Image (cartoon, helix red, strand yellow):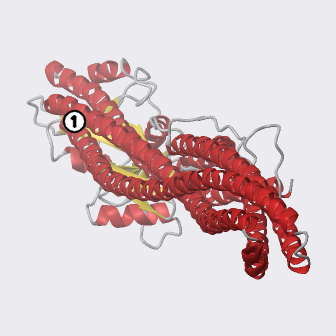
Amino acid sequence: MATQNAKSKKNRKIRDKLLLLIIPAVIVTIVVLVIIASLLSRARMQEMAQSTLESSITNQADNIDGWLTENLQNFSTIKQGIEGMQPDDETLVRYLTTYVGKNTNSPNGVYVASQSGQVVKGNGADIQISNPTEQQWFKEGMSRVNMAYGSPYKNEEGQYVISASGIINDGGDIIRVAAADVTLDQISIIVNSGVKMKNASSFLVDTDDNMILAHRDENLVSTTISDTSNDPIIKCAYNKIMASDYTTVNTSGYTIAFQEVAGTNWVLVSYIADSIILADITKLSLILMGVGVIAVILITIMISIIINRVVRPLASITQHISAMSNGDFTIEIARESNDEIGVMGEQVSKFVALMRKMLSSINDESEKLKQESNNSDRVSKNMFDASQSQENAMVNLKNTVDELALAVNEIAENATTLAMVVSDTRENSNQANESMKETVEISKQGRDDMEKLSIAMDGIKNSNDALVESINEVGKASEEITKIVGLIAEIADETNLLSLNASIEAARAGEAGKGFAVVASEIGKLAQNSAASAENIARLIDDVGKAIGSVVSQAEASAENIEANSTLIHTAVDTFDRIYQNIEKSNELLDLMIQDVQKVDEVSTNVAAISEEQAASADEILETSKHMVEQARSITTSSQDVADNSHELANTSQMLTGYVQQFKISKEEGIVNEG
């Protein structure tokens, strides 16, 4: 139970270590991706806002130009009618009256002033003109034949207006100027209503005198812009107009675009606050953060499940190896995967089967050796008893010659019995010697097999190290591919930006740039697709890098387990060496016992011969009785040696059996501990 608890604790440590290494890396990666996505989205949103603002202001300028042109054409048509009719003053009044209130942009219609100071206007026209020759519109009209707009001014009603004026070419002697007024209020309505970008604002500036012609704030209309203004937008507009630089600019938290109105000296300024542009980016960043947190939770759960699935076979193998270290070879290891862990489990299973078979053979041989040693011990005891009886008989023979004949016969019989016993003992000793030699060969073969298994485990470890190096090489190659993909993404971004600039230039070119705009649009789509593909490749390579890191961690864990298994196998080799040495020692003792038995056989043969001679001659028996006593004592000593050797052989056999019984090779057997 303690071993299982230790193993469980170790598995939890491995899992926790992997989680502590992987989860922070995942969190950092997701945070970096969220930050990068927010920054890219911010830059992209600013680019899109700038493009939309430029498109909006271009559309506004076109609308203003179209509005001015439409009114100017109306005024020019009326002037041409006057030139064609050459009417008198009464007819001219009737003619001008027909246009009063017809044009909402110029409700007073067209009026005519002569160089003499006479002003002719249509009935119903609400306009007061004194000293017309001194008016700005009259002076500007005297310089041109065609109707054209002049500079803004304040009329006698206190309104800021812009007049279109031109000389009437009717062939008469009196120089007359036709004019029509457009109020700045009407222009402000057109400027403010023409903004196409949501939350954007615009104002119109006359570059001749830097006067604001139209603005959302009516208090700023007809005022002059300068670099001393507290408004950063007006200050920026002044500096850009003075430098004749009408490119879009970002300043003081605003994006400001400029556009000249064709046919005039007017510049349209459109602006929008960056906080409005980036409001959606803030929401998107919060959404990305929420998605990132959810992704971290899901990835953590997924990684935990994967780690548990990967570690589970290792836990089973570790449990079986722990059981092996405690001598249990009844385990069965099933191959649960086709990777290195599965191969390791299969090899351990083969090792267990081989060890089980080997231990079973050693156990059988040790039992045989135990039986033989018991037989030898029993024979040696009998032989010792016989030698004791022979010694007593020799003493009695020495003490009494009268009983010599009976003693000689008894000695002969005992010698015959001793010869038979010694013969049997020699045969049993030979058999025990053969069994011991066979056991020596088997133990030697077991030791060689364990050494081969140790070499095989070293080979597995080297292969696993080579695999880790190969995977690291793959990881380095993935990093190189990631750099290349990053370069492709940068090229795609640059191409997309160039495509956007080309589209803008094509839009400015009008009809002549439509074909180039289509090509630029296709290039932009191709660049976006390339960027998206590069991003997908980078993401896939990142996933491959993570999988490679996971595989390297698993391979390193396998290397640690292989190292532990190698240590256990080396320990088993040392145990087999001890077994082999003990068996060799038992074999040497058995050889000594056989030699002693041969000596006993020789002695018993001599005793039989002497007994026959003693039967023939009592004198010779008496004379040799002393010698027989000494021989009997020698036999007793030898018998004692044989008994000691047999006992030592029995102890060796018992020791060998104890070693084998430390291992459990069947379900019915228990584990026998030392001591």
Give residue 430's position: percent from left, percent from top: 60, 54
How many circles with numbers are drawn on the protein?
1
For numbered disc 1, what is the local secondary structure? helix
Specify the quadrant of the image occupied by residue 168: top left
Specify the quadrant of the image occupied by residue 571: bottom right
Neighbor class of circle 1 (other Cα within 10 Å; few <14, some 14-19, many 20+) is many
Q: Is residue 572 left or right of residue 460?
A: right
**Residue type beneath disc 1:** Ala
Residue that mark 1 sits on: 520
Q: Is residue 516 above or below residue 494?
A: above
Q: Residue at x 87, y 75 (%)?
A: 401
Which image quadrant: the C terminus? bottom right
Q: Residue at x 44, y 44 (%)?
A: 539
Give residue 239's position: percent from left, percent from top: 35, 67
Q: Is residue 353 left or right of residue 51?
A: right
Q: Residue at x 84, y 74 (%)?
A: 394
Between 223 and 536, the residue placed more toward the observer is 536
